[in-house]
RNA sequence: GCGACCUUGGUGAAGCGGUUAACACACCGGAUUGUGGCUCCGGCAUGCAAGGGUUCGAUCCCCUUAGAUCGCCCCA
């Protein structure tokens, strides 16, 4: 027997679960629009080079996580693993850099990464993201971050902080990386196997290694390691200070974390993550992250436009909202069930249902059975507020029997008044 | 890519190397031909993720594959 099942790491969203996604989407886009951010919808598939060249050939995303295939015309196609590079492509292709001022865009949709699924991680997942293109100005960083906080607030999530850092320009990072290598080299044999590998590949990762930060001998070594801020240029440092000042101005809670480094090549200067802290002050998975990309557009097309943006992991946010009881309003409900007790009544019931539905009243019907019992059961199952009974008696007397489960009443309502009766309750 | 643990009906789940795979909820039918959600009675997995092996015999033991969950790596 054929055994059908969904692709590993993908999800079906049925009924209430789909409702939660739509709820998030509508709140987030409403807030974004209040910031003057316009929606952009780009294809889910792109030329593979869009991601290879911009996310970074050495990044994990490109090296091992992309869904890439050849189409029938031998073109290398990739299911987008993230939004920024695809939108940069769109920005350039449509010469949007010619637009005056700052271009502000938001997007929503599925992303694909070939990874082992685990908590808050899927192979197909949804991201909501914001991208600004224009100048480099600290207040732009601040506005972008504040838009994210506005979304959190509207969703009802309060205990969010951003972890923020500046990783400077690429030269600053290279210097810093070399300094770390030099610093850790003499002690490296005391470190875990992962870190022995990291010292050559990505020495920055040693800084937040979970193993070595909990070992007595290595903990101190990490604590005393050089920090990025000492390797930033004067301009980068000043810029970062302005950003932080802007956040203070809007009372946005942040934690400067010099160990925060992000894995995508295009980031420069400001980088950040949104983290939820529970009652015990423990932090969750990052709900989203982002940063500035000063050179992304320039590297792609030579036009010097600064970019910045962030993205949320929608599944992670919805999971958190579930835990906080913020999705309790997402329930199946039904306004009315209309019961018909014989063939004639059933026809009349269907006609009434059509009228109700045209007025936006959610109405359900039993199709096959005329028995009162089975039709009452339907009403229970769909959690209907009103139960309207049509039978021989009602047809003769030109009334409907209407039960209101909320007020626990039953009365006869004249046929001509039924719509008003329901609408006024 | 690596590791841990798991996979029994519509759902939650017991179960032991050996005849009909508990129990509960849900569902269907009846008791009850215009007032249900209570009660009572009856029905409901030739099958225990898939495939192979060991065995006289496996849902329970072994192997392989797929998938779920949770870690590492990395990320949203």
Image (spheres, coloured by chain):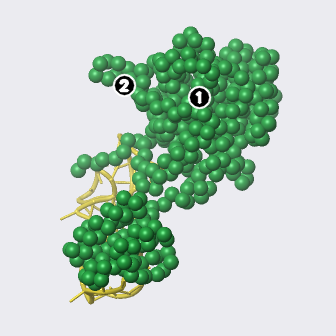
| Residue hosting label 2 | A69
Q: Tag on residue A104?
A: 1
Q: Nearer the viewer, mark 2 or mark 1?
A: 1
Badge 2: residue crowd in 10 Å (few <14, some 14–19, many ≥20): few
For the residue labelled by badge 1, is the local secondary structure a helix, a strand or a loop?
strand
C-alpha span from label 2 to label 1: 32 Å
Question: Between residues A414 and A55, which one lies in front from this camera angle?
Answer: A414
A363 is higher (above) or lower (below) than B28: above
The structure residue drawn at horizontal position 72% and vertical position 54%, both measured from the top left corner, is: A279
**Tags 2 and 1 in contact by the CB under 8 Å rule?**
no
Q: Which hue is chain B drawn in?
A: yellow
B62 is higher (above) or lower (below) than A91: below
For the residue labelled by badge 2, is the local secondary structure a helix, a strand or a loop?
strand
- In the rendered structure, the answer to whether residue A387 lies left or right of residue A169 reads left
Tell me which chain the residue with mark 1 is part of. Answer: A
Q: Quadrant of residue A393?
A: bottom left
Quick check: can you spot residue A22? yes
- In the rendered structure, the answer to whether residue A367 lies left or right of residue A217 reads left
Q: Which hue is chain A drawn in?
A: green
List x then y, in percent, for residue A397: 30, 83
The structure residue drawn at horizontal position 48% and vertical position 69%, both measured from the top left corner, is: A424
Q: Earlier in the sequence, mark 2 or mark 1?
A: 2
List x then y, in percent, for residue A283: 68, 45
Question: Between residues B2 and A324, which one lies in front from this camera angle?
Answer: A324
Q: How many marks?
A: 2
List x then y, in percent, for residue A162: 70, 38
List x then y, in percent, for residue B16: 39, 67
């Amino acid at each position: 027997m054929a055994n059908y099942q969904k692709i590993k790491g993908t999800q079906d969203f049925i009924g209430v679960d789909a409702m939660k996604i739509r709820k998030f989407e509508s709140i987030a886009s409403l807030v974004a629009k209040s910031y003057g951010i316009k929606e952009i919808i780009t294809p889910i598939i792109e030329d593979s080079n869009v991601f290879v060249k911009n996310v970074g050939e050495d990044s994990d995303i490109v090296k091992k996580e992309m869904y890439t295939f050849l189409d029938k015309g031998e073109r290398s196609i990739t299911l987008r693993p993230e939004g920024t590079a695809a939108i940069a492509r769109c920005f350039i292709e449509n010469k949007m850099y010619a637009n005056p001022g700052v271009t502000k865009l938001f997007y929503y949709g599925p992303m694909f990464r070939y990874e082992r699924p685990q908590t808050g991680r899927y192979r197909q997942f949804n991201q909501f993201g914001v991208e600004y293109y224009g100048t480099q100005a600290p207040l732009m960083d601040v506005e972008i971050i504040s838009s994210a906080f506005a979304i959190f607030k509207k969703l009802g999530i309060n205990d969010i902080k951003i972890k923020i850092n500046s990783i400077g320009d690429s030269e600053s990072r290279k210097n810093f990386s070399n300094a770390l290598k030099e610093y850790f080299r003499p002690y490296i044999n005391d470190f875990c196997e992962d870190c022995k590998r990291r010292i050559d590949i990505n020495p920055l990762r040693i800084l937040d290694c979970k193993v070595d930060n909990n070992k007595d001998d290595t903990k101190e070594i990490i604590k005393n390691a050089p920090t990025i801020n000492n390797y930033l240029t004067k301009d980068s440092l000043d810029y970062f200070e302005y950003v932080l000042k802007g956040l203070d101005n809007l009372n946005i809670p942040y934690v400067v974390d010099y160990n925060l480094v992000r894995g995508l090549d295009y980031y420069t200067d400001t980088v950040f993550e949104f983290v939820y802290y529970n009652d015990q002050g423990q932090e969750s998975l990052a709900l989203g992250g982002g940063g500035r990309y000063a050179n992304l557009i320039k590297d792609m097309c030579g036009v010097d436009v600064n970019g910045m943006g962030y993205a949320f992991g929608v599944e992670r946010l919805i999971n958190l909202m579930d835990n906080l009881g913020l999705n309790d309003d997402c329930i199946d409900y039904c306004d009315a069930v209309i019961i018909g007790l014989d063939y004639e009544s059933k026809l009349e019931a269907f006609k009434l249902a059509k009228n109700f539905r045209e007025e936006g009243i959610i109405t359900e019907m039993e199709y096959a059975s005329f028995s009162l019992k089975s039709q009452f059961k339907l009403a229970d199952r769909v959690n209907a507020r009103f139960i309207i009974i049509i039978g021989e008696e009602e047809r003769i007397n030109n009334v409907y029997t209407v039960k209101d489960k909320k007020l626990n009443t039953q009365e006869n309502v004249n046929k001509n008044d039924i719509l008003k009766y329901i609408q006024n309750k």
